Image (cartoon, rainbow, N blue to C red):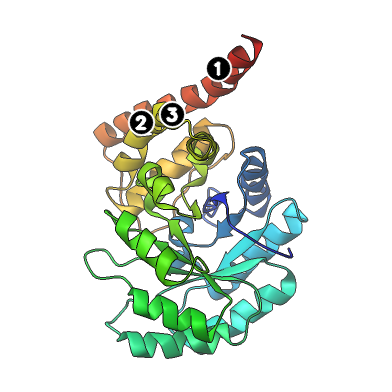
Amino acid sequence: MPNFKIDGVVPIIPTPFTSEGSLDIPALGSLLDFAVRSGVCAVCLPAYASEFYKLSDDERRELPLAAVQHLKGRLPVIAQVNHVAAARVREIASELERAGVSAISIAVPRLFGIPEADLLRYFGTILSALSVPVVIQDFNPGGPTVSLEFTKALHRQHPNFAYLKLEEPLMAARVRSILEGASGEVGVLDGWGGMYLLELIDAGIAGVMPALGVSDLLHAVWTSARAGKKEEAFQIFHAILPQIVYSLQNLEFFHHAEKSLLQQRGVLTHAFVRDATLSVHPVDRAHLDFLNCRIVELARELPERAASEISS
């Protein structure tokens, strides 16, 4: 899509599997149709929340290609391409760009510690082969993420580096420093399920990349907050937040939470999570079902609430 820009919610599409554990491409269509109905501005796959690290190279290609084909321009597709080898990312990302994805997202390779000077070379190798906008995701639990100097230097060398996705607490000052330091030319995206969304809207983030199952509700938070209706945004957000916080205790637990929620919302038939994964304890499962039911109820109430406000 020309003039691609992120302004709002970009859900990560989970990878649907059959009950036998193979890719379920028809179910992917149902997930993408739900994203369209949710009012989001784009979709992204296959990322951490898509279990990308359990997929073969062919499967990682197949999912964004299938998404482009199914959506037919109804929503932009951001293809996530994660690999430690820069040449591999460059090859796959170039193929996906030719196939019609609107942007590429790449995670900083954190398997081993790599100095920023070497990360500049790594991303330069990839960015120089692409013309679409690129999102760089830095997910580094317990460690430092890329610096402002890195962000500015990479954007100077490769202007198609357009967005930096961060997944850390107390991010407002970093958002402001990146926006000011890069003259507004590198947007910052909030990750980690959208847990910090409300305060970061005030800081100036370009968007949020949460789970699909709550994306319609977070879209309502985004639009209300951006319209200056922070109390209204808070009322919705505080009802969603317990489910987000509970599900993100563990990434594998998150997959079970997300797929169960989508199943409860009638979007997904099979809530299958590929091994290796954890077994969910019955107590945790019961509480998860409780929280997911609250999300389902909230999603039912919001349109009724809006209709009531319009009529009054």
> Mark 3 packing: few (<14 Cα in 10 Å), some, or many (20+)?
some
Mark yes or no: residue 142 visible. Answer: yes
Residue 127 drawn at (x, y percent): 56, 83
Furthest residue to the top?
Answer: 312
48 or 151, which lies in front? 151
218 or 288, which lies in front? 218
In the rendered structure, which disc, 3 or 1, sits on the residue that comes first in sequence?
A: 3
Residue 64 drawn at (x, y percent): 63, 64
Label 2 with label 3: CB-CB less than 8 Å: yes
Residue 42 drawn at (x, y percent): 62, 53
> Mark 1 packing: few (<14 Cα in 10 Å), some, or many (20+)?
few
Who's the residue at 33% across and 76% down the image? Answer: 110
* Kind of residue sitting beneath label 1: Arg
Quadrant occupied by the C terminus: top right
Residue 255 drawn at (x, y percent): 41, 49
Give the vertical position of 26 relative to 144 (above or below): above
